[in-house]
Amino acid sequence: AQSVAQPEDQVNVAEGNPLTVKCTYSVSGNPYLFWYVQYPNRGLQFLLKYITGDNLVKGSYGFEAEFNKSQTSFHLKKPSALVSDSALYFCAVRDPLRANFNKFYFGSGTKLNVKP
Amino acid sequence: GAGVSQTPSNKVTEKGKYVELRCDPISGHTALYWYRQSLGQGPEFLIYFQGTGAADDSGLPNDRFFAVRPEGSVSTLKIQRTERGDSAVYLCASSGTGTTTDTQYFGPGTRLTVL
């Protein structure tokens, strides 16, 4: 079965410092990977996705993620964190099997706290 | 443009009652998804529509749950004989064509509380 794991329930970082939110995946076949952010009382917002091509993917709000096939990871990064980045972040993988491509599997989420 | 909207934003009901949750997808999006998000968890797939038909309902937990999308736009998730364990946030998402590279766009969710 396809799955993603977010090993950290919470990440704390000071404003201005770089941040990393970790995600590892387990997929049969080529992975389609996504990051979403969820602010309180709001729906999930798309940040970025990896389908194919360059391993470094750039997305919204200055976020980027690096696809690492050998480590089966897709960590979310930002060079300089903002207090406004504080939110819940979800990694997701889309089932690459044609019969199941509509299925997305989400991690349990990582709460990012950026302190002034 | 307008995003995905969901109504109501909150629903409190009593055990055993019937509830309907509504989703209005982004105009023109043919693919529509329902997810359930329990506290402290990521969204869990329930059902996927391509147009009017339920292309994959394998995530529905049991036969108390049912969803329709009669005209290929608005969708309604229906839960019969609600149980306390049904309490969760129900999310709807839509995407353009439902193809592999598509991005899903989520609504704000309906928080269902079963007393």
Image (tube, coloured by chain):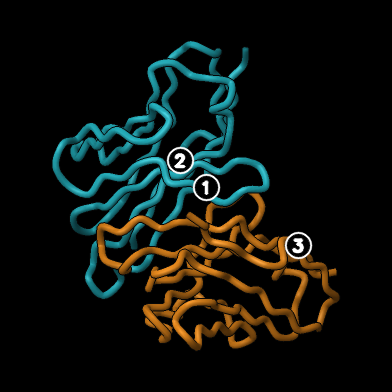
Chain colours: A cyan, B orange
The 10 Å Cα crowd at callout 1, few under 14, some 14 to 19, many 20 or more, is: many
Disc 3 versus disc 1: distance between alpha carbons?
Answer: 23 Å
Q: Which residue is mark 1?
A: A108
Amino acid type for the residue under numbered disc 3: Asn
Q: Does mark 1 fall on the same chain as mark 2?
A: yes
Q: In the picture shown, does residue A82 fall above or below A74?
A: above
Q: Which residue is mark 2?
A: A6
* Residue depicted at x 17% and y 47%: A52
Q: Which mark is residue B10?
A: 3
Q: In the picture shown, does residue B1 fall above or below B114?
A: above
Badge 3 element: strand
Disc 2 versus disc 3: distance between alpha carbons?
Answer: 28 Å
- Report in which chain the residue with disc 2 lies: A
- The mark that comes first in sequence, 2 or 1, is 2
Please provide percent x and percent y for residue B12: 82, 68
Q: Which mark is residue B106?
A: none
Q: Nearer the viewer, residue A3 or A109?
A: A109
* Residue depicted at x 81% and y 83%: B16
Amino acid type for the residue under numbered disc 1: Ser
Q: Are marks 2 and 1 in contact (CB under 8 Å)?
A: yes
Q: Are marks 2 and 3 in contact (CB under 8 Å)?
A: no
Disc 2 versus disc 1: distance between alpha carbons?
Answer: 6 Å
Please provide percent x and percent y for residue A50: 26, 45
